[in-house]
Image (cartoon, rainbow, N blue to C red):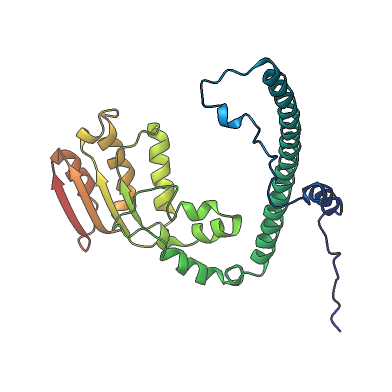
Amino acid sequence: MTSTTTFPKSRINNSVPRQLGAIENPLHSPAHVILPNLQTPFSQYCDMNYAASDSESRQIHHIIADQIAQLVDVESEIERVENLMARLRGFHLQLTDSRNKIQQTINRHQGLISCIRRFPAETLGEIFIHCLPPDPHIQPNPRQAPLLLTRICRSWRQVALATPRLWCSLYVGPSHRVQQQALSFYHTWLSRARSVPLSIAVDTRLVHAPFNPMWRFEVTELLKRYTSRCSCLYVMFDEEASLHAMLRDVPTTAQYCCHPR
């Protein structure tokens, strides 16, 4: 018999409905504000050049005093409503935060039963291959496959590093990295391809590497160990010396294209 573990169900803090009720009660008022009658015996004279007599002035002072009292009441009500609105905004933020955290928890638990987590490593590796950019020679980009696939989670990184076909294509161009870092990066990339035939495009033109005049010599030395495994090699060059040094070990069965400056 299979046992089932029952987890306690969590609920929103009971104080929230009580607090909302405390806010709603003062709001149980007419749907619209009832304005006092602002018409006075003197309203018709307000837009005229009318001068009130002494007795009328006393009446007008009483009217103004009454309207000031009404204004104080309205301003007090406005302040009360603004305070309620501020409290409502606070509760809205709390509830929104709770909703987001609940949704995050749901998403994380849904991930535990996701089909892709049960795929064999070989199947996942084939899917990763279809994620590669359409370019014939991949220019390394941390926001694209295959580098992106190594940054999702540990298991995806292991699968990506164990799939040689993800690393058998490469564009090698002048880099702003420190020289040894750049060369080490390209070596690491190509070594992950293991025994899979390589397709490499390399730019040795100095016009694209003014910050590193030794670039073409360094990259030529780096690729010497890999040219014998190339099934396709595309070279951009500005000096035939660097080209001949690179093509020396290219197998006769490989396809290669040379593009002079």
Residue occupying the point 69% across, 62% down:
106
Looking at the image, which is closer to me, 11 or 213? 11
Looking at the image, which is closer to me, 171 or 23? 23
Which image quadrant: the C terminus? top left
| For residue 19, side relative to residue 68 (left or right) | right
Q: Is residue 180 above or below residue 68?
A: below
Residue 229, x across and y down, in percent: 31, 58
Residue 117, x across and y down, in percent: 61, 67
Which image quadrant: the N terminus? bottom right
Q: Quadrant of residue 197?
A: bottom left
Residue occupying the point 66% across, 70% down:
113
| For residue 41, side relative to residue 8 (left or right) | left
| For residue 6, side relative to residue 232 (left or right) | right
Looking at the image, which is closer to me, 138 or 18? 18
Q: How many marks?
A: 0
Residue 234, x across and y down, in percent: 22, 52
Residue 217, x across and y down, in percent: 26, 36
Q: Is residue 167 above or below residue 214?
A: below
Looking at the image, which is closer to me, 64 or 144? 64
Q: Residue furthest top?
A: 54
| For residue 151, side relative to residue 168 (left or right) | right
Residue occupying the point 68% across, 21% down:
56
